[in-house]
Image: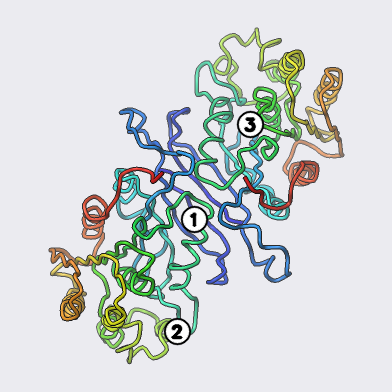
Amino acid sequence: MAYFQCNYFSPTLCFNTDINVIIPTPNSDEILNNKKSDYLYDGAKFQVLYLLHGAYGDYSDWMRLTSIEKYAQDHKLAVVMPSASNSFYQNMYRGSDYMTYILEELPAFVQSIFPVSTRRENTFIAGLSMGGYGAVKMALQKPEQYAACASLSGAVDFMGIMKAAQSGEIQGPFRWDCIFEHPDEVQGSEADLFALAAKRMKEGARLPRIFQSCGTEDFIYQQNVHARQEFEKLGLDLTYEEHPGIHDWNYWDTHIQRVLDWLPLANDSVKE
Amino acid sequence: MAHIQCSFYSQSLMKNANVIVFIPTENADDYLIGTDVHYGCKGGKYQTLYLLHGSYGGSTDWSLLANVERYAQSRALAVVMPSGENSNYVDMDKGEAYLTYVTEELPAFLSKIFPLSKKREDTFIAGLSMGGYGAFRCALAKPELYGFAASLSGALDMQELQKSTEAHALKMPSGYREAVFADRKHLEGTDNDLSALLAKRVSEKADLPQLYMTCGAEDFIYPTNEIFYDNACKLGVPVTFERAHGVHDWDFWDTHIREVINNLLPCCGDLKI
């Protein structure tokens, strides 16, 4: 695996930002253990997973707190980890356009610099907590861009989470008055995933497959159970899992491996 | 400019390697002014400068101690800054194969990852001190790879430097010095003797890269530059030697890498499409 820490000016965010990118390249393990290592060649492209951090975090979290590099190497998957502050992956009313950044600029930037596939069938997005919401949000916002999305311990029942955070029932760093112009009018908008999914279903859009996983002792477990019911009611292509666990990196390190097993991966580079 | 720190397993070094890579991308100035460079254009490739550090240095030196990022951005030039430890960028007699790494693995590997042109006229190499020697050593080892090579305060008379008993030469741990060259006190006539390697390439009628060298007259390494330049002149090789003022320091290297990037490299100022 080659590990790239990349700092550059984002014209969408209008400031310098960091991303971590990992690209499968032949490593010592493959040499020592005679594993397949013929996947990097001129013109080789990789399937790519955009992997989103949660609240309080940034682009470095997944690399520092899980073994995503090892899992991605096993699957010959490129992984891109951006930063989105505490924006809930929205175009903030008072703040930066993180949704546009993640949906539009980031894939174009990454494709122009790194050997990743541009095809929908090879493009995936996942995240944890706020990033689990972000992953499903992006996938439903632009379903023609992603073949699949995955939420780990995600805030996918967005209205439920927002209300619990506003009432102080759960902790959060979110400035709702910065994220939204009218925080009281979010329900039914495109930030509300149930409403967005319903809209896309009504449009007859070809929607990405969804993977949802949450720990049964997680403080947002009940909201995940509710989101599952809503997604199933809407008829989305949902794979749901729950396992013992709380809202922590043990859960995410374990279950990001489930996500990679679930994704339609070639376990090889792809031609384009 | 995208400032990219790369860490990957190097097959020629047989260990993990760190490289800093600059890829031109729209920066804040471009955004404000509306510069028209074809950043990110599909299929476009960047001209590339391989930039080598000196002894006691590493891959981050050029990015931290000079303003290469600004100069390269202004010419839409990608820059690759590897680490060569204290190898003099040769395939060490008892150690890692840095010449192979810099001239073979790195261009092949990085062009699979990044949009870097592989054409000779788009590929340049430069360095300071040990890296100045390295730039010429690589360029003369593989003259077909590079359109231009520049040495700043280069250790161009390596055979004499290896015999030197001056304080700066003795600072290098003897174990390391013994590992680099098979017989370091008798480099004359080998490929590690730049004058001899140059003579060999001339006798082969090789198509040589454009060679540029500069050194400060007050630099302790200046005499080695005059010796190499004399030898090149005797061979009839058109080397450009800019005799400047300055010592062996980053003020000199920042000033002169700016000159190399801004005025000497045949940069087209855009992606090659």
Q: Circle 1: is it few (<14), some (14-19), or many (20+) Cα within 10 Å?
A: some
Q: Residue at x 40, y 49 (%)?
A: B46
Q: Nearer the viewer, residue B43 or A247?
A: B43
Q: Nearer the viewer, residue B122 or A76?
A: B122
Determine whether label 2 and label 1 are within 8 Å by CB: no
Q: Amino acid at mark 2?
A: Ala
- Camera-side mark, 3 or 2: 2
Q: Residue at x 31, y 85 (%)?
A: B162
State which quarter of the image contains the C terminus of chain A.
top right
Please state if A42 lies on the left or on the right of A163 as rendered: left
- Asked if marks 2 and 1 fall on the same chain, the answer is yes
User: Percent from the top left, x then y, of residue B106?
Assistant: 48, 63
Quadrant of res A235? top right
Q: Label for residue B168?
A: none
Find disc 2 in the rendering and name its residue: B179
Q: Amino acid at mark 1?
A: Ser
User: Percent from the top left, x then y, of residue A174?
Assistant: 61, 23
Q: Nearer the viewer, residue A76 or B147?
A: B147
Quadrant of res B260? bottom left
Circle 1 marks a residue in which chain? B
User: Percent from the top left, x then y, of residue B117?
Assistant: 42, 53
Determine whether label 1 and label 3 are within 8 Å by CB: no
